Amino acid sequence: MKPLRIIFALIAFSITTTAAAFAAAELLETGSSLVYPLMNLWVPVYTKEHSDVKITTQSTGSGTGISQAVAGVAQIGASDAYMSDAQLGTTHMLNIPLAISAQQINYNVPGLNDVHLNLSGPVLAGIYDGSIHFWDDAKIKDINKSVASKLPHEAIIPIHRADGSGDTFIFTQYLTFSTPSWKNGPAYGTTINWPAVPNAVGANGNPGMVQACQGAKYSIAYIGVSFLDQTNQAGLGYAALQNAAGKFVLPTESNILAAAAAKDKETPKDERISLIYGPGANSYPIINYEYAIVNPKQKDAATASEVKAFLTWTLTSGQNKSYLDKVHFIGLPASIVNLSKGQIAEIGS
Amino acid sequence: MAIVALSGASQRRSRVAPLDIVLRYGTTATAATTAAIVFLVAAFLVVYAYPALAFNGFGILTHLEWNLGNQYGTGVERHGGFSGAPGASFGAIVFIVGTVVSSAFAMAIATPLAILVAIAMHYQVPRRLKTPVNTLVELMAGVPSVVYGLWGIGVLVPWIANSLGPFFAAHVPMLSFIGSGAASGNGLLATAFILAVMIFPIMAATMRDVLSTFPKIVFEGAIGLGATPWQAVTTMVLPAIRTQMFAAAMLALGRAVGETMAVLMVCGSALNQLPQSVFAPINTIAAVIVSQLDSALTDPTGMAERSLAELALILFAITLSVNLIARLIMRGGDRVKRTV
């Protein structure tokens, strides 16, 4: 009697679940590991309100996000970097900003982790190309007069991402836009041709960067702002960066907003633009849009309308600070939300 | 008696024969499939990597620089009739050296240990403890590599950075000038340690099996003639089975060469430079394929992905030759024994 009941229950369960699976539209979001925590805040709330849709989220890296969105495997590819002209080629893909992220430069210099060292693009370029070896280098002392005597004569360990990364993309853009020798040398990309620095270490993912920076004294690393809580817990310092106006600024909400406001009028209709090293006295220099990469031609009308509905929700209810603050992201300015909505309107089947 | 058995067999034959046919062709087919899969993998790699083979030429074996090219630049780089992103150049020498050197270091650490442990397991461990000890070593061999990698990140790397590196810098003056690279702990030494820990149990278990093929009576005879156990093992047992022991070591080497995840976690992912000291960051073929894949997928020319396939082809060739060498040596050893 009992086993029979279990079998019946199983059959009933499987019928109802398959029925549910057929009724619901299934969307796959994959890509950037920076967007992933935000998606994990958004998706449960959204699918609770919209029980007819099932959204799977994956943290696979921006490159995978882009390629799977182009291939049609994923409906939404998350990327820290917008697609280049060469990547777009003849395909038409939408690059829709969902939020604004920033990146901090973390360092592990015992005794100085509680002060915010001043760092500039040229100094960081010098550290990462090997021309600046020690923490007490004259170029670092020059911009840190108040703590110059405390800077140790220890070799700097520059840590960079070993895997392909949107963080590498925006960090190297900062170096490229601020330092001519870097522009003519390694330039920028999700993976670049790192100069051979004997101490340099590659780490995997943002968690790997935190771990490596914490584990190695006198190291320096670039880490996405959504890991600010972790880097603070790890006792790492973070730098005030020199912006295009020459001022050293911290990645505070107001400085990130100032940087976004300085660029929002320039943002073109397809929203593929770098926000790095923009104008403005208080603009923090390393910020970026987090993108949803979406094919405007979805496989059927039902999928298209579900993608549109979800993306529209992320730009309205989803911009609430209750979500964004948890990952230290900043909401999009109204004009950018409108541009993004304009792009979402292009999605069809 | 024989007649009875034969007639029994013929009676049964009529019922069993179809199954025999199934068994014969089934096993032949699966065996052939196994061989075919190896060839298909090789063929796939060659076909898939072909554009990279043409684009990179022999440069991949000589160049230090691994550069996907500027994916946000304009224009393309053309070589051998195929195009890559502007500035693209793919040199694998850093990864080949990293793979070979880290595996060699790991072998140097693991092999003597494995031989000693195998000898201990076979001759020294009391019978009552044999099963638990054997099970333990086999369990170690079965631990997923990512677990070793986590231990490497959490324990080994900080230990090298904070204890071993500074100790070498302070007390081994010869190494101190190259020892500065210990600073981060990630690198050749950490990789070699992790690989050694991973391959040592496999090696020890295989070597114990090899030892058990050696007739125990000969060992006991040597003891009876007054040899110490150490003398008996080193003068009688090991020389007799050295080719099989070598083959066991080579099989473990095959695993070290292809190990990916644990290596990726502790190697320091060096690019564009060869290690200058045992503490310096390195990179291996398997690790770089994983870490570069995501970026390679965004290369609009596709050349980065093809070049990773070429790396896989190189790794395939290295693994295959390690196995072939092991087999040839084992064959040679057998022949010698037979003539003796």
Image: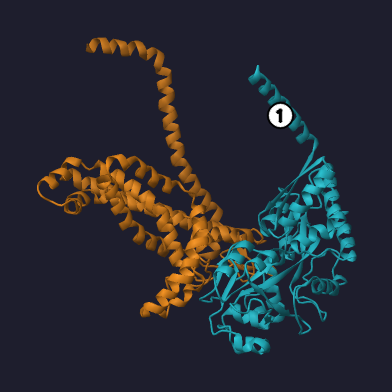
The colour applied to the residues of chain B in this rendering is orange
Q: Position of residue A320 (x, y in %)?
A: 85, 58
Give left or right: position of A343 versus A35: right
Quarter of the image for residue A10 reads top right
Q: Give, as a three-letter code, the residue at label 1.
A: Ser
Give left or right: position of B213 versus A346: left
Q: Position of residue B279 (x, y in %)?
A: 45, 71
Q: Residue at x 19, y 43 (%)?
A: B338
Query: Label 1 belongs to which residue?
Result: A14
Q: Quadrant where the C terminus of chain B lies?
A: top left
How many labels were placed on the picture? 1
Residue A95 in sight? no
Q: How is the image coloured?
A: by chain
Q: Position of residue A236 (x, y in %)?
A: 63, 71
The answer for which chain carries disc 1 is A
Residue placed most toward the observer, B33 or A36: A36
Residue A165 in sight? yes
Q: Residue at x 79, y 38 (%)?
A: A24
Q: Secondary structure at mark 1?
A: helix
Quarter of the image for residue A93 reads bottom right
Indicate whether B301 appears above or below A51: below
Indicate whether A272 appears above or below B254: below
- Which chain did the renderer colour cyan? A
Q: Residue at x 82, y 65 (%)?
A: A271
Neighbourhood count class around disc 1 (C-alpha, 10 Å): few under 14, some 14–19, many 20 upward: few
Q: Residue at x 74, y 63 (%)?
A: A83
Q: Position of residue A251 (x, y in %)?
A: 75, 73
